Amino acid sequence: MKKVRSVLERKAKGRSVLDNARIAYNSVNKLRGKKILFPKSRVIPIPRKGGFLPLISLFAALGALGLLGEAAAAITKAVNDAKAAKDQLAETEPHNRAMETKRAVGSGLYVKPHI
C-alpha cells in the first residue's frame, strides 16, 4: 500500500480523478503480478448523426409550414367569399328596388263570401 501511495504522490499531481484511479490500478497490478482490468465506462454511446431523432425537428417544421398554408388558404377563402357576397348584393339591389316600386293594383285580398 505504501508503494502505491508513493507512486500516486509522484504521478498524480495535476491530473484528474479518473487518471489517478488508473495510475492506482496499474501500480497495484504491477505489485500483484497479474493484471486487473480497469472497469470500462458504463456510458451508452449516443450517435451524433443519423437515426430517427434528427427527423423529429424536420417533421415539426413541416407541420408548422402546413399550418401556415392552411391559415393562408382560410384567409384567401374568406376574402373571396366577401367579394362574392358583395357582388351578389350589387346584383340583387336593382331588382329589389324595381319590385318595391311596383304596387299591386287593388284594395287588398278579396275573399268570396261563403253561401
Image (spheres, rainbow, N blue to C red):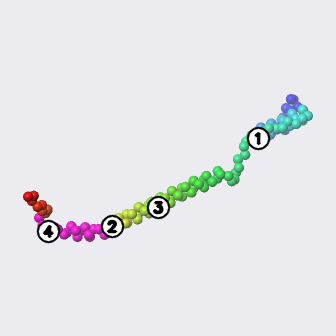
Indicate which disc, 2 or 4, sits on the residue closer to the N terminus: 2
Indicate whether 82 appears above or below 57: below
Q: Which mark is residue 105?
A: 4
Residue 98, percent across and down? 23, 70
Q: Which of marks 4 and 1 is nearer the N terminus?
A: 1
Q: Which secondary structure, mark 1?
A: loop
User: What is the secondary structure assignment of the residue under circle 3?
Assistant: helix
Q: Is residue 42 left or right of residue 61?
A: right
Please state the horizontal and vertical placement of residue 36, each as a whole percent of the image.
85, 36
Q: Name the residue under label 2.
A: 88
Q: Is the magenta stretch mostly helix, strand or loop?
A: helix
Local SS, label 2:
helix
Task: Tell me the amino acid under the disc marked 1.
Answer: Ser
Whether residue 27 is visible to the viewer of this picture, yes or no, is: no
Identify the residue shown where x is 77% and y is 37%: 17
Q: In which quarter of the image is the N terminus?
A: top right
The residue lying toward the viewer, choosing from 88 and 23, is 88
> Upstream in the sequence, badge 3 or badge 1?
1
Q: Residue 77 carries which label?
A: none
- Which residue is under mark 1? 41
Q: Give the range drawn in magenta.
A: 91-107
Disc 3: CA contacts within 10 A as few (<14), some (14-19) or many (>=20) = few
Inspect the image, locate mark 2, and give the three-letter code of the amino acid beneath it. Gln
The CA span between labels 2 and 3 is: 22 Å
* Quarter of the image where one finds residue 26: top right
The Cα atoms of the two marked residues, 4 and 3, are separated by 52 Å
Give the number of callouts: 4
> Is residue 96 inside the magenta stretch?
yes
Q: Quadrant of the C terminus?
A: bottom left
Classed neighbour count for the residue bearing mark 1: other residues with Cα under 10 Å, few (<14), some (14–19), many (≥20) = few
Q: Which amino acid does label 4 sit on?
A: Val
Res 35 quadrant in image: top right
